[in-house]
Amino acid sequence: MSKLLIPPAVLLLVLMALLSSDQDDTAADLVLASDSEIFTLDPQRMSWLADMRMGYALFEGLTKWDTTDFSCHPAVATGWTVSQDGRTWTFDLDPEARWSNGAPVTAHDFLWSWKRLLMPDTAADYTDLLHAIDGGEAFFTWRANALQNFDPTRDDAEALIQETDRRFADTVGLVALDDHRLQITLAHPVPYLLDLVAFAPLMPVYRPAVEGWPENPDLIHGWHLMQPPSWSDRQFVELNSKTGRIEADHHWARPGTLISNGPFSLDRWRYRRDLRLVRHPHRKDGADAPIQSVLVRSYPDPTTALLAYRSGEVDWLTGVSADMRRELVEARRVSDEQDPDLLTRSTHAKLAYGTEYVGFNCRPTLGDGRPNPFHDAGVRRAFAAATDKQTLVDMVSGLGDRVTGMFTPAGSIEHYNPQGGISFDIARAKEELAAAGWTYDSDGRLINGEGDTFPVVDLMYSTYSPRYQRLCTGLRDQWIRNLGVDVHLKGQDSKFFGADLREGNFMVARGGWYGDWGDPTTWLNMFRGDDGNNDRGFKHPDIETRLNEAKMMADQQARLQSMARIEEDLFQEHLPLIPICQLVDVSMYDPWKLQGMTKHPRLVQYVADITMVSPAPESDAP
């Protein structure tokens, strides 16, 4: 196999990157480059893959996955029992589990962390996960209503917090039976609960660190044995007397203040530069591990990250988005892990538990107050029918991405197989537009009954990857050609892109979603009106009702069939987004050097499971 050559001009960029890097950046046993910026290290607020990768290194939940087959195994919980009706679970916790400051990890930590996730004050994306707990949804609704109706002229914020604590204790099915036994009572059976409690947002956090309690030597025995300090003495939270809301300063999740219970502790974090982890000082399972420190580096663009890998500056690229990746994947298809060329043998491509899509803002009005044409499902169906997915994928990828009409990747969940979707059909697209009140005048303009021209379509994407721009450029050209509409591209930095999505400041946006657990709910919950990841603002009472009915079904086969019908209706009738293709994950690591890397589509790689072969076989590094 001939070596993949990098042009001299590009190699110059490698030299520049090396010269600009800090001298101490290589002071780690394992160096990786994240495929996106890390936004938060607060588990309850995580929703991005890069954040969760660090979450699984820093924190540990009741269970953890075997990343070869995603079966669930004990973590902080050493065992569990389940009632005959499947609604009451009792978890036994490891009495030796410790936070990185030496304090014990107890059932009270999980209880408080899950209460924090359930509080509307936290504004977390995954709050609805705890609605499956008996009384969880009712508690959330009560607290949200109490905050909405709070009147500082008559209501006292401190009294409301005390009432909130009482209601949580009295009505929510979470009980610390003792320091090392946690009981969960569910509103209905959740057959995938062990999978769910391994998920990052359900990992515990250490309350004194999150709230910024003053230092106290008695904390080593457990914060739950102490009276919490006054609100004025808590550094990172305050109780707003005008709104009744707990307002958090998220800077607790920084070096020096973040306390964790996972395999690693946080040593350094310099935003847009690097993040460094070291082994948890109070865990026996890491004392003799070959990887005692991890450095996560940031690069200005994907090509620079690839070049840093080629130069030996990085051991693992968690995602390869550079323009060369098509060539790399093609070379790897005709090779194997014994190829002498470093880049060829290091390229790993696999169909992922993820879907690339284009999402519509489904709200009645846009962020600037204008009427939103995509509020009409007929318009959304028209744009879907005007999209030639195969041509798009062939143009932007060449990685073997599988086009799809459904959101959940085909065959990814056993016994779950929704069918259908909207095919490429320009005639149907124009029929859908006409039925929605948009027709073409004698000049070919698309107008409504009042003579208003169809508004310019803003198509937003993150500028992190060249793929995103190519995809949106192809979509723009197809929609202009097939529908006669005006489409403008809007590229944004990842941080601003994410903020605009959450705030609904967009018209159409490119997106990608990776499933978080092995059940259709990880895909379909996004279409609940109150779901924290429903950036599109899609709401439909029939879908909501049917999702609620499905979650109450005790018969798992009937439940899966019901959800499959819901998904079919979503993507044949409602179209809150256009599924484009099942994503292909491309990462880069040398199999001669790193072991313990998962090949599973779920994309969860526990950093603590990685081992390094030493000495590694010689490669063709320059």
Image (cartoon, helix red, strand yellow):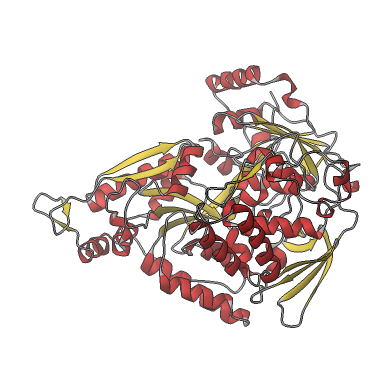
Rendered location of residue 256, percent (x, y):
76, 34
**Camera-side residue: 116 or 20?**
116
Rendered location of residue 272, percent (x, y):
60, 30
**Camera-side residue: 139 or 557?**
139
Quadrant where the image shows the N terminus: top right
Rendered location of residue 269, percent (x, y):
69, 32
> Where is residue 334, by image quadrant?
top right
Question: Is 466 displayed left or right of 13 in the figure?
Answer: left
Quadrant where the image shows the C terminus: top right
In the depicted structure, whether residue 403 falls above or below residue 275: below
Q: Which residue does the image show at 29% across and 50% down from the upper left? A: 479
**Camera-side residue: 422 or 202?**
202
Q: Residue furthest front?
A: 154
Question: Is 364 displayed left or right of 205 in the figure?
Answer: left
Question: Is 159 displayed left or right of 609 in the figure?
Answer: left
Rendered location of residue 438, percent (x, y):
19, 59
In the depicted structure, whether residue 103 falls above or below residue 409: above
Q: Is residue 472 in view?
A: yes
Q: Is residue 337 in view?
A: no
**Camera-side residue: 285 or 5?**
285
